[in-house]
Amino acid sequence: MEERNLTGVRPYHMPAGGWGALKATAIAIAEQMHVAEAPELLLRTNKPDGFDCPGCAWPDKKHTSTFQFCENGAKAVTWEATERRVGPEFFARHTVTELLGWSDHALEDAGRLTHPMAYDAATDKYQPIGWDDAYARIAQALQAQADPNAVDFYTSGRASNEAAFLFNIFAREYGTNNFPDCSNMCHEPTSVGLPKAIGMGKGSVSLDDFDQCELIISIGHNPGTNHPRMMGTLHDCAERGVPIIVLNPLRERSLERFANPQSPTEMLSLTSERIASNYYQVKVGGDASALKGIMKALLERDARIPGTLDHDFIAEHTGGFEAFCDDLRATPWEDLERHSGLTRADMETVAAAYAKSKATIVTYGMGITQHSTGAHNVQQCAALLLMRGNIGKPGAGICPLRGHSNVQGNRSVGITELIDPVMFDNIEKTFGFRPPAKPGHNAVNTMRAISAGETKVLVCLGGNFAIAMPDAERCEAGMRGLTLAVHLNTKLNRSHLLIGKDAIVLPVLGRTERDMQATGPQSITVEDSMSMVHASRGKLEPASEHLRSEPAIIAGIAHATLPASRVPWLHLIEDYDRIRDLIEKIYPDFHDYNARIRVPGGFRLSLPATERIWKTASGKAEFLIFPGLDEDPEFPQALKLTTVRSHDQYNTTIYGMDDRYRGVFGRRDVLFMNADDMQRLGLEHGDKVEINTALKDQTHRRLTLTAIRHDIAAGSVAAYFPEANNLCPLDYQDPESGIPCYKSVPVELRKLPLAA
Ligand SMILES: Nc1nc2c(c(=O)[nH]1)N[C@H]1C(S)=C(S)[C@@H](COP(=O)(O)OP(=O)(O)OC[C@H]3O[C@@H](n4cnc5c(=O)[nH]c(N)nc54)[C@H](O)[C@@H]3O)O[C@H]1N2
Ligand SMILES: Nc1nc2c(c(=O)[nH]1)N[C@H]1C(S)=C(S)[C@@H](COP(=O)(O)OP(=O)(O)OC[C@H]3O[C@@H](n4cnc5c(=O)[nH]c(N)nc54)[C@H](O)[C@@H]3O)O[C@H]1N2
Ligand SMILES: [Mo]
């Protein structure tokens, strides 16, 4: 049949990267700022005396590399350094109701926030407010709460260590452990699942390990878009002949072929490097089965070829191996094939490649974590590595790809809703108060409490909480019940417009900007995906003279709210070294903090598993069994919806409407589908479909999109986040880690007439 010609949908056959990426960077710069200023700005990214790129948490070698070209890093930087401004005149022109009709792209594209603004119900507009008045209004609302647990403190992962630490101490002194954060939607399964397996909730590899590895297994991440600087590393490994095995339901172009914009030869000769040696299109939600199949094949191989498994390592360093093997043996191949979508031969091929490699890295992203089995999935990755002793040796290990550029650091300085007795003891010793004994809310529990009317005040250190969360309609209704929402942000977003009784938006300095305090310009510090902590210093003139730094705003609110506080808030922000001295007292791993961040490249936090010290209950690394194979045993026939990022977005920030490498241009209203599934359901390329969640929980969730044929595993469909968040149920989460299942929602489709 003749293929329908669809506007803005055409296949992309070029390698990722290359001149296309260079052109896209030039356009991004030209749209947002004076082209003459851009090179200087971009050259300061990720330099020892420059600022940390807000784009992603991938590290830089010794943080001293020459300029690393990165299209999406440039977008993140120029989006912040834009010349457009959203000030009092802007708000005078637009009511909140009118702004609610704008797209997410249009809201942020309007420019940088310049003044503190407070909502005025009479005019339905945000009106300017002075900083002290804003602090007083917030303090009054906080002091009015009979129960401090009626307040929630949300952190998005761009905040610096200094800001996150002050936020932590402020909220705990105020009297709550309610710390929802973006990590609850991102790598919580790593933070919760990995410690039980290897005694720490962070990655074990460093960049040097990538120089020495013999095999990379890459699962559920899209680095060409989300960690573009990682492409340079993968490209180098591929060039060295290292096999790269990919498990991903979508054929992501950058994982197939990549032209390195860093390489003059490739750029001039229009050549590129193959990235994946083997690409397996696992079903959405099929990773645990695929990993179990690979491990089962490995076990069977070990019976034939002794030495396949590292029995010495297993005996000396691990527990639970026998029971783990019994489970693998008892799991039939047919089940593993059906649930993973891979054949037994595929899984045996991966096992054979793995058995050949003396040093293997498993690297993964949201395709592994955002599932009802997220923590188990992470543990299966760890088990695969443990079978051949691939943790705690050069060239090997586990490499979770963190999201926001400092999401890992926020956790290291205490952003957690859980009770941490050591931290609480140190807080008591240092500040003379003890945080409350009751655990607080994570992100999902916060949204539940908001929609139940139990949370009255929400204070957000960055981010776009209500839009990033599942169940958009429920979140919106909940936000409208708040007494007060406070948002510290660089740009206007939809969460600011979901107003209850009162709302205050406070404009913050970005990473790129100079942060001047009483003792002079300040540096902040961040931690990358590989636990390296280093300083970041912005140099640009701030977007407005009214901006304040995140630490200064938190200190201002704390000072106003807690007049009898034992913390010298205003003294601390005069010189951020003073904040770091306190961080070191609460978290001894940061010892000699101020001295060590002054060394170019910074320092690495301790990672016991890298030295084969296992901080688990048993003192050994543990093989943990994943019971059962299906995430949603109730819905074996349903299609599984996964929600993904386009190439032109940063989470809820939509830079533009293209998704170049997936061949989608100028639109985001598509549902990626497998050709056989379309045929089975009587759908044609370009048909409109109504998507309904198959979960039976009394809520009718639906969305209309255009179905397009795409190279995606059978039984799996994909749509863009955040448009599809309405289809993700808030209560559908991993029981272990609490993460919402953004990457595996059972859905049913209904064909609509084209005119619908
Ligand atoms: N430019 C840019 N950079 C970013 C971000 C951004 O939005 N834009 N976001 C930042 C943040 S906060 C994060 S957390 C990271 C996110 O980085 P990624 O983890 O790369 O994020 P996603 O786009 O959500 O999707 C990841 C990949 O998972 C695959 N996938 C989907 N479902 C499954 C599954 O069930 N199994 C497997 N194996 N794969 C699956 C998808 O096909 C896709 O290739 O990136 C960070 N960096
Ligand atoms: N369906 C679905 N939903 C998802 C996901 C998914 O894959 N699928 N991914 C989840 C993940 S991994 C994450 S991390 C969350 C993201 O959730 P969030 O972190 O809450 O959201 P962002 O979109 O990153 O936040 C964007 C806002 O950050 C502000 N901002 C930017 N830079 C700064 C800064 O330096 N300081 C301050 N204070 N503000 C700043 C801007 O005002 C901008 O509007 O979304 C989650 N939601
Ligand atoms: Mo994330």
Image (tube, grey):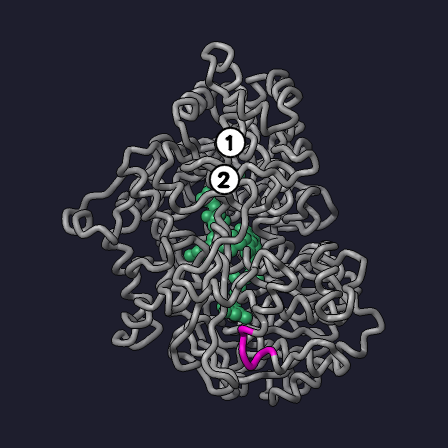
Instruction: Report how far apart the C-alphas of labels 1 and 2 lie in the structure.
Output: 8 Å
Q: Quadrant of residue 2?
A: top left
Q: Nearer the viewer, residue 691 or 597?
A: 597
Q: Nearer the viewer, residue 595 or 442?
A: 595
Q: Is residue 179 left or right of residue 408?
A: right
Rendering coords of residue 623 (x, y %) = 62, 29
How many numbered marks, from 0 up? 2
Q: Quadrant of residue 408?
A: bottom right
Q: Is disc 1 in contact with disc 2, using a CB cutoff of under 8 Å?
A: yes
Asked if residue 85 is positioned above or below residue 296 in the image, the reply reads below
Name the residue tied to disc 1.
385
Label 2 Cα neighbours within 10 Å, binned few <14 / some 14-19 / many ≥20: many
Q: Secondary structure at mark 1?
A: helix
Q: Nearer the viewer, residue 9 or 650?
A: 650
Mark number, residue 398: 2
Rendering coords of residue 41 (x, y %) = 33, 71
- Amino acid on which disc 2 is placed: Ile
Kindly identify the residue that appears in the image at 63 percent across and 48 percent down.
Answer: 740
Q: Is residue 18 left or right of residue 525?
A: left
Rendering coords of residue 428 (x, y %) = 75, 65
Query: Which residue is at the far right?
Result: 146
